[in-house]
Image (tube, rainbow, N blue to C red):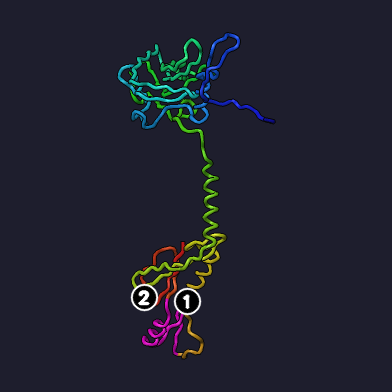
Amino acid sequence: MANLITLKSFPFDTLEILNEESGQMEPDRWYEAEIFRKYFAKFLSNGVYFGNYKNYKENSMKVTSDGGLNIRVATGAGLIEGADFENEEERIFSLERPVAGERIDRVIVKLDKTLAIRETQLYIKEGNGTTPAILQRNDNIYEICLAEVTVKSTTNITQNDVIDTRLNNDICGIVNSLITVDGEELYKRFQDYIDTVVENLVRKDQDIIIEGNIVAKSIKQVNGKTFSTNDFTDAYKSKLDGIESKANNYTHPSTHPASMISESSSRRFVTDSEKNTWNNKQKAITRGTGTPSGGSNGDIHIQYF
């Protein structure tokens, strides 16, 4: 077949074939451990498992003080560069007290791929004074740090001396899938879809709030490309201010009897009955973001947010 390229892949069933050099039947597929490690490393990050497996959860590989110069490492499991590790029982380490001052030691899980070792190891790596030991990471060795422990020359180790570093992705981390989705892009696409749907909807204004004797109507408008409830621009709010101001600022025409007297910026009637007649005819129009209160029958309140 033209232009056919064989890609590196696995796994496939093994067949016994004849080795022409040895004259023996041998498997035609061999898979080294490195192939499996690289496979898992493609979609699982380094670190500690926090899952339900054996109920390890958030206590997986957690380091705590255990009296004197002792520390305790809880049971747990994890993954380093595609290689699985598990601590099936709690481990206790006794740290050495410095002659003077203090020292920061690290609790390490190490993957060692050298032919002489080929395993994962849990151990204590002593620091240089208050400088923690450097993690070794190369083709054969990869170390992650579970915790940093301050060891003092004058006092024993307390829980305050133990810093949990399992959540620090730079030196340890929690095992997660490396297959991710761009959440921001996904949200944008979803929002665009919603906007398109909303643009084609006609919403009837049916939101009515009854507060005391006031009936308040929820006003809806088209803003840009989306329909929204009570979503007014500053320009619309200014118009509402004008409506309220003019509706509640009644002034009598100049043709009223001369018996009317002026007081401040408004006018009043001589008799209470005449004044009440005009007050009953005029209704209040108010607006704001709060729920309407007070007022009387016929008053109008425009609520927006």
Determine if the magenta segment contains residue 275: yes
Which one is in front, 67 or 42? 42
Which label's residue is closer to the chain start, 1 or 2?
A: 1
Compared to residue 181, the image places residue 32 above or below, namely above
Q: Which residue sits at x=53%, y=41%? A: 182
Determine if the magenta segment contains residue 261: yes
Percent position of residue 275, x then y? 39, 84
Q: Are marks 1 and 2 in contact (CB under 8 Å)?
A: no
Compared to residue 241, the image places residue 193 above or below, namely above
**Residue type indicated by callout 2:** Ser
Q: What label does residue 247 carry, if any?
A: 1
Q: Which residue sits at x=53%, y=46%? A: 186
Q: Which residues are magenta?
A: 259-283
**For numbered disc 1, what is the local secondary structure?**
helix
**Residue type indicated by callout 1:** Ala
| 137 on left or right of 152 | right
Q: Which residue sits at x=51%, y=87%? A: 254
Neighbourhood count class around disc 1 (C-alpha, 10 Å): few under 14, some 14–19, many 20 upward: some
Residue that carries the numbered disc 2 in the rendered image: 296
Q: Can the viewer see residue 155?
A: no
